[in-house]
């Protein structure tokens, strides 16, 4: 009887471990410096709000001058960021879209999928609630925006 109970208990414990393991979305959220000050629970909630987007190579994701409605995280693939100063590339772990959302200005760059890409998008309201609702996260976000605007960048690792 004891071996049967042990096996049954092991299976249940393993199922709990699988549930507790961080999702890909949680890992991506953890990599964004402006989300670092948020609690684990806040980051988990944020991760559940991410919308997966598969983008074929050559497709424009955001266009300079458009109204910003989402924040994007790059899960896989390569994106090309077109700036006035030239072009840059970004890949897995990079993110973009925060400048338009935090400063309430039009998009500062055109971002195109250089290769097939998997992105996660966070709607404007969810992004702003998470970042502006936490003093340290807002300070970190404003620091990222300031650095990018000074350096003429649209994507950071």
Image (cartoon, helix red, strand yellow):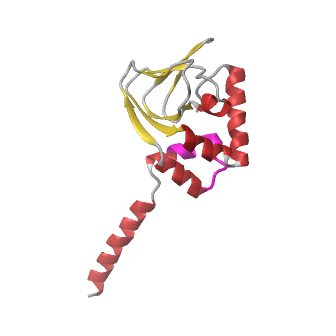
Residue stretch in magenta: 28-39
Q: Is residue 75 above or below residue 58?
A: below
Residue visible at 34% across and 77% down? 9
Quarter of the figure with residue 119: top left
Q: Is residue 80 left or right of residue 149?
A: left
Q: Is residue 8 left or right of residue 32?
A: left
Outermost residue on the bottom side: it is 1
Q: Is residue 58 above or below residue 19?
A: above
Quarter of the figure with residue 103: top right
Q: Residue 90, how many percent across, how many down?
A: 52, 26
Residue visible at 39% across and 61% down? 18
Q: Tell me the quarter of the image containing the N terminus.
A: bottom left
Q: Is residue 14 above or below residue 102?
A: below
Q: Out of 29 and 70, give the one closest to the viewer.
A: 70
Q: Is residue 31 magenta?
A: yes
Give the tally of numbered discs: 0
Residue 35 seen by the camera: no
Q: Residue 34, how many percent across, how many down?
A: 65, 41
Q: Residue 56, how many percent across, how many down?
A: 35, 24
Q: Tell me the quarter of the image containing the C terminus.
A: top right
Residue visible at 56% across and 30% down? 96
Residue 45 seen by the camera: yes
Q: Out of 86 and 130, give the one closest to the viewer.
A: 130
Q: Is residue 47 left or right of residue 155?
A: left
Q: Is residue 4 magenta?
A: no
Residue visible at 37% across and 26% down? 116
Q: Residue 81, how many percent across, how many down?
A: 53, 20
């Amino acid at each position: 009887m004891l071996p049967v109970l042990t096996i049954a208990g092991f299976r249940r414990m393993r199922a709990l471990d699988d549930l507790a393991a961080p999702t890909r979305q949680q890992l991506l959220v953890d990599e964004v410096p402006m989300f670092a000050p948020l609690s684990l629970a806040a980051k988990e909630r944020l991760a559940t709000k991410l919308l997966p987007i598969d983008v074929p190579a050559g497709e424009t994701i955001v266009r300079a001058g458009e109204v910003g409605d989402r924040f994007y995280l790059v899960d896989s693939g390569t994106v090309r960021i077109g700036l006035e100063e030239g072009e840059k590339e970004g890949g897995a772990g990079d993110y973009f879209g925060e400048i338009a959302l935090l400063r309430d200005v039009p998009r500062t760059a055109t971002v195109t999928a250089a290769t097939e890409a998997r992105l996660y998008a966070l709607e404007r309201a969810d992004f702003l609630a998470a970042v502006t609702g936490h003093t340290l996260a807002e300070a970190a976000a404003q620091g990222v925006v300031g650095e990018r605007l000074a350096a003429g960048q649209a994507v950071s690792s």
